[in-house]
Image (cartoon, coloured by chain):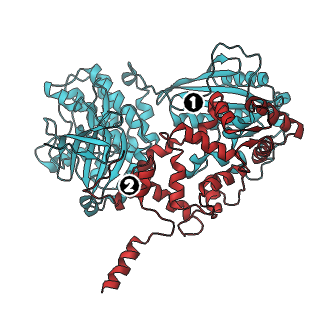
Chain colours: A red, B cyan
Amino acid sequence: MHTLMGCFCFKKLGHKPGYEAPINLASETPFTVNEVEALYDLFKKLSSSIIDDGLIHKEEFQLALFKNSNKQNLFADRIFDLFDIKHNGVIEFGEFVRSLSVFHPNAPEADKIAFLFRLYGLRQTGCIEAEELKEMVTALLCENNMSLSEDVVDLIVEKTMMEADTKRDGKIDDEEWKEFVKKNPSIIKIMTLSDLKELTLAFPSFVMNSGVSDLQQPVKN
Amino acid sequence: MEETHILFGKYEMGRLLGKGTFAKVYHCKDLTTGESVAIKVVSKDQVKKQGMMEQIKREISVLRLVRHPNIVELKEVMATKTKIFFVMEHVRGGELFAKLYKGKLKENVARKYFQQLISAVDFCHSRGVSHRDLKPENLLLDENEDLKVSDFGLSALPEQVRNDGLLHTQCGTPAYVAPEVLKNRGYDGPKADIWSCGVILYVLLAGFLPFQDENVMNMYRKVFKAEFQFPPWFSTESKHLISKHLLADPEQRITISDIMRVPWFRKGFKHPLSFSIEESVLDHVEDDKLPSPKFFNALEFISSMSSGFDLSSLFEKERKSGTMFTSRCSASDIIAKIQGVAKGLNLKVGKVKDFKLRFQGPSEGRKGRLSVMAEVFEVAPEVAVVEFSKSAGDTLEYAKFCEEEIRPALKDIVWTWQGDSFNHCSNVKIDGEGCKMQALPTAYPTHNL
């Protein structure tokens, strides 16, 4: 009888591997428990679009971004790699919530600037090199079906390095990056998702199965 | 009394504002912003018993889309194991119908509320939401005496919280409800709302209901036949307008766009203005004279043009279309072209800077005149980027304007629109001929090559 009950409970709570309790994630991020529950709804949708295993695979991520699972894209790959904190090729729920929290309108700007710096540092050398910049411009042109001569691409990269690489050592380091973003604030616009402020309205399914206890509503900060 | 109750660590609970069998509304304070809100607390058990859960979920996600100055905003929903909390904007001025305790309203005053009601209803209908339950309890006034419609889309909630008032009808009377709704047929939400708006205008001008009877069955009969009479003080124009609302056949009823053309309605009508938060942040010092467009560096170029970085698409079912395009024309050619196109579309064009234009729509929209900025940046001598952004007006009208007016009109100078390669898979563009061929645009099909 006891085992039967246990079985039943397990099945009822049956969360997929990689699941983390909303209450824990809420304590680490700007999200409330309800918002994490709402994000779980989105996560379930994204992680089951191709294989329903509770993990977001690369193809599922591409499908969500481009509505096309075969669309390879350097920038989507970079985001995926940064979201995949454990580097095991998939995005787990906890990774999803923690990474998205940087995109919250209330998240510290310094976090957004740092995240973007890592995103652009393709080879993770701790800086953005001219070579990487060129690779990204080329990828962007390709993404948009634009062809430009290599000379023009070099010119774009050169002009940008002139502006950003104030130490003239062929790469943009952390310090130069912060200065550069300060002068060109539009660059970090992509680091803020206003949708994250309306999670409970956009994904209201959590109201049905919220696990928040009536007695102990969690107190935030 | 010794403890203050804090909801979710976010809202300090204050006094009870209203109470029904299934719901209670409290006045609360948002601890982070200091803002005052009204929180409606509903028991999940009751909602489940009524089989309303799915409907409520659907309506919450729809309500997110209806932000309008004359609609009470739903800010957030919260839940525990047993309760649902709807966090709403707190409206201080009480119910509109409390005004009627002193008697009917002057025509000008009634018109103002009716204009605001229609404006709110029109906005919702444009977003695919109908109220279905427009009635006195749902019409509130804010501290500036402006109308706020509440419970848009939440009419499925079991029993609205009601305060008692003179004109409140007893529970279940059909005073405001369209005949086709009473007949319980499949009905058209927007058309039913128009009926209710007609009843409301009548009540504001008369001080009593158009369909009233001691006997509920008689009342039904009157509603079904749309049988009512005007008191002698109604103006001809207002009688005419109300008659077009209160037609038993929903197909015959006046539409919102027709209401808005009626001179009686138009008198002193102001569209609510909204200044968008979507205003571009790429603002520079106004008076530094630039002989050439601003240089768009590689990282600005990547950040703004790459669809791979745009995570907002995780939240959307369909791909949205881009607001930027690249061009091989010179910045001054682009500016000249956009100015020409804008004039052709009857827009008012102004120069903000040498390479930044602002244009305004020819007519009032749902949230005032549409105002759009276009700025040209230079990535390289033969590559320019043009960014459009809305600085005022209705988002939906803006999207339609971009899609139906701007895009086709500019196709000669566009190299690629941001994100288009994902929408039309094998769309390879031949570049750069646009500037020279303005005279013969149809001879060079530049799309779908």
Mark 2 → mark 1, Cα distance in angstroms: 31 Å
Instruction: Relative to B142, say whether B193 is above or below.
Output: below
What element does badge 1 sit on? Answer: strand
Q: Position of residue B55 (x, y in %)?
A: 36, 56
| Left or right relative to A128: residue A154 | right
Residue topped by disc 2: B57
In the foreground, B81 or B73: B81
The amino acid type of the residue labelled 1 equals Lys
Residue at x 21% of width, y 22% of height: B233
Measuring from the top left, give residue B410's x and y in whole percent: 72, 32
The residue at 56%/51% (across/down) is B314
B230 left or right of B80 in image: left
Residue B407 visible to the viewer? no
Relative vertical location of residue A120 with respect to residue B158 in this rendering, above or below: above
In the displayed image of the protein, which residue is found farthest to the bottom?
Answer: A1
A204 lies left or right of B235: right
Q: Quadrant of residue A21?
A: bottom left
Badge number at residue B292: none
Work out whether residue B220 can be spotted.
Answer: yes
The subunit carrying tag 2 is: B
Q: For mark 1, does the 10 Å Cα neighbourhood hold few (<14), some (14 to 19), or many (20 or more) residues?
A: many
Percent position (x, y) of residue B427?
Answer: 77, 49
Per the image, the residue denoted by label 1 is B390
Disc 2 with disc 1 on a shared chain: yes
